[in-house]
Image (tube, rainbow, N blue to C red):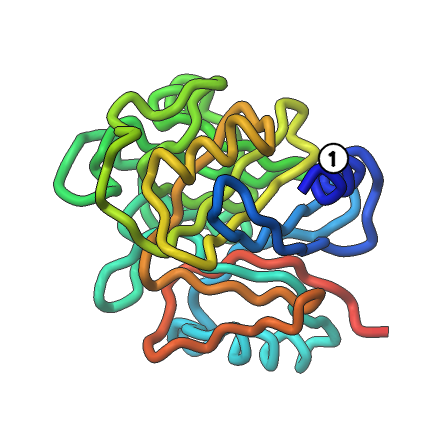
């Protein structure tokens, strides 16, 4: 485990040509951990195709990109959505806002405040707690709101319980303090919120991290030969876009 951690830390400080994914075991739980260098990688959000239909699957999105001389590398689902695949919270794609910020509490994990926003800007990615996002009002090229926050300025979400019995497959994202690195994680086995948040805080050493979703979570990790299809369409998808040589 120490060797893999050292390799991950090297990825956090070394420019990459594309997102790097690896499997690791932490506290008896196994995870796929994908590291994106925003100074080199083109990370984008996607929801609807040219006809206004949700892409729904990584393969559908990749085929659409291929038609325009691009391809999809690493990808994962990126936030909660309604039955029609519309985002639950704030969503911006290529500078266009599809849904405004929701700052009130509510039912379900999204409403377990504090929640947060992943904001993509040129050469950087940042996870903001929602109230901080509203105060600072950054101009995001792409943004997706989800919840709950996993790590807030180095602290776990205050409602995470070490002895919780609620266990699900979970995925989320954390960002480095300088915004140059985003680390996406999906668990291979069911985990609690406390275990998942602790991974970002204690193992990955990331100051802010955001939960994306639970049982619907999927990942496309070419390094590992993994391309989850699932039985239902996804809502927002985030992925690394590459030019086809």
Q: Residue at x 69, y 72 (%)?
A: 71
Q: Nearer the viewer, residue 59 or 225?
A: 225
Q: Nearer the viewer, residue 188 or 235?
A: 188
Quarter location, residue 55: bottom left
Quarter location, residue 222: bottom right
Q: Position of residue 214 (x, y in %)?
A: 33, 54
Q: Which residue is mark 1?
A: 9
Quarter the C terminus occupies: bottom right
Residue 42 lies left or right of residue 233; in this view the side is right
Query: Vertically, is 59 above or below 81?
Result: below
Q: Position of residue 187 (x, y in %)?
A: 46, 53
Q: Residue at x 70, y 52 (%)?
A: 42
Please tell me how crowded label 1 is: few (under 14), some (14-19), or many (20+) other residues with Cα within 10 Å.
some
- Hey, which residue is sitting farthest left in the picture? 107
Label 1 secondary element: helix
Q: Residue at x 26, y 36 (%)?
A: 102
Q: Is residue 132 visible?
A: yes
Quarter the N terminus occupies: top right
Residue 154 lies left or right of residue 161; in this view the side is right
Quarter location, residue 9: top right
Q: How many marks?
A: 1
Query: Vertically, is 189 above or below 193?
Result: below
Q: Nearer the viewer, residue 149 or 185?
A: 185
Q: Position of residue 11 (x, y in %)?
A: 77, 41
- Hey, which residue is sitting farthest front in the picture? 28
Q: Residue at x 60, y 81 (%)?
A: 63
Q: Position of residue 50 (x, y in %)?
A: 48, 75
């Amino acid at each position: 485990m120490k060797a893999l951690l050292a390799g991950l830390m090297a990825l956090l400080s070394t420019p990459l040509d594309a997102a790097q994914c690896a499997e690791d075991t932490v506290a008896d739980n196994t995870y796929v951990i994908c590291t994106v260098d925003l100074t080199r990688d083109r990370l984008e959000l996607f929801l609807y195709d040219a006809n206004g239909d949700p892409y729904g699957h990584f393969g559908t999105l990749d085929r659409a990109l291929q038609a325009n001389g691009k391809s999809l590398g690493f990808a994962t689902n990126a936030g909660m959505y309604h039955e029609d695949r519309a985002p639950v919270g704030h969503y911006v794609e290529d500078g266009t806002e599809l849904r405004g910020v929701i700052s009130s509490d509510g039912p379900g994990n999204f409403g377990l405040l504090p929640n947060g926003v992943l904001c993509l800007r040129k050469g950087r990615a940042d996870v903001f707690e929602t109230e901080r996002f509203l105060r600072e009002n950054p101009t995001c090229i792409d943004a997706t709101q989800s919840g709950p926050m996993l790590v807030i300025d180095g602290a776990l979400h205050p409602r995470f319980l070490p002895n919780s019995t609620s266990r699900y497959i979970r995925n989320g994202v954390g960002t480095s303090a300088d915004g140059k690195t985003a680390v996406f994680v999906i668990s291979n086995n069911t985990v609690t919120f406390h275990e998942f948040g602790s991974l970002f805080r204690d193992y990955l050493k990331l100051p802010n991290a955001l939960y994306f979703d639970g049982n619907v979570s999927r990942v496309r990790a070419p390094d590992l030969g993994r391309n989850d299809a699932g039985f239902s369409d996804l809502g927002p998808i985030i992925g690394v876009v590459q030019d086809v040589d």
